[in-house]
Image (cartoon, rainbow, N blue to C red):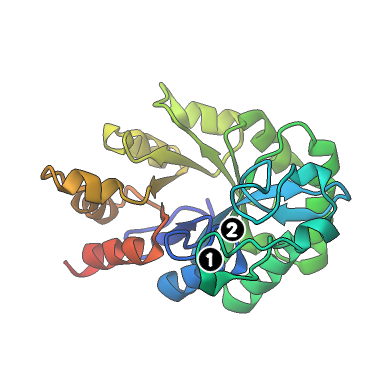
Amino acid sequence: MNPLRMTPETIRLGGHRGHSAGAPENTLAAFRKAFEFGGQHVTCETDLGITRDGELVLIHDKTVDRTTNGHGLVQNMTYSELSKLDAGSWFGDQFSGERVPLLKEALQLARELGIIYQLELKIYDANDVFFPKLRALIDELGCADLLQFSSFDYVQLKAVKQAIPDVPTVGLMHSRLIDPAALARQANLDAMNIEIYHFASGEARQLHEEGFAAFCYLPAGYHEKLLKYGVDIEAQVVQWVREGQLDQLLGDDVAQVAKIRDRAHHG
């Protein structure tokens, strides 16, 4: 049985970099807010980085410049240096003092609240360094059930499934694929994330027929922009949920994806 396959009733909700519409991305504050709106088993998509001294941290960019008050490459900083930076004030004064979290801290929070992380592997050339670190951390905390791995690099996803078979994997895709299920099979994936722009074209049905899960991401502002011109994206997504085409709906705004789920369930 595929652990990521859901039904219209059990569809999972997710927050892109946590509830990044209402809190600084990839911080414990954003993960807590995602839980607030999404409840038990909410999935927080987040990004894996590594410091100079080998600590696994959650940050999207290669540099700290955009999301902290510091400057420089993550991989050139020790965790001690990184931990002194403010990763919240740029978003709002009330988040001043938020830190770039260690993966370990985030997993401890996940166990406490019952949230799941979809960990995007952002480092493509150091499997030999961070796969053993991930394996050791998962064994130490017993937290394979709190994780999914995702990447745009399908060779890497195949390798991580081999190294850590107890964590499901999610292939990210930007463009439409001629045969997504064949690719999912080759990479030994559990799910693929289909861009919302392409979702209507039927890949989800093909993936489901062959036993794979179908995820989708709703970017902040996308619905509102098109609604001005009479295109109701939320109504389309509600329909996809009702038809059972979606296993996980991810958004920058977890309150919005929760609303879509509730509309699908209750009309």
Q: Residues within 10 Å of mark 1 (few under 14, many from 20)?
A: many
Q: Residue at x 59, y 58 (%)?
A: 26
Q: Residue at x 64, y 47 (%)?
A: 65
Residue 60 image offset from top left, x and y in percent? 61, 47
Give the structural element (helix, strand or loop) at label 1: helix
Q: Are marks 1 and 2 in contact (CB under 8 Å)?
A: yes
Q: Residue furthest top?
A: 178
Along the line of sight, which residue is nearer the eye, 78 or 255?
78
Query: In screen coordinates, is 86 left or right of 52?
Result: left
Which image quarter: residue 195?
Answer: top left
* Badge number at residue 26: 2
Q: Residues within 10 Å of mark 2 (few under 14, many from 20)?
A: many
Residue 169 image offset from top left, x and y in percent? 60, 45
Residue 22 image offset from top left, x and y in percent? 44, 65
Along the line of sight, which residue is nearer the eye, 211 or 198?
198
Q: Residue at x 80, y 36 (%)?
A: 126
Query: In screen coordinates, is 172 left or right of 256?
Result: right
Residue named by callout 1:
30
Give the structural element (helix, strand or loop) at label 2: loop
Along the line of sight, which residue is nearer the eye, 231 or 248?
231
Q: Residue furthest left?
A: 230
Q: Mark 2 is on which residue type?
A: Asn
Query: In the rendered image, is residue 57 in sight?
Result: yes
Residue 162 image offset from top left, x and y in percent? 74, 40
Q: Mark 1 is on which residue type?
A: Ala
Q: Is residue 259 above or below residue 237?
A: below
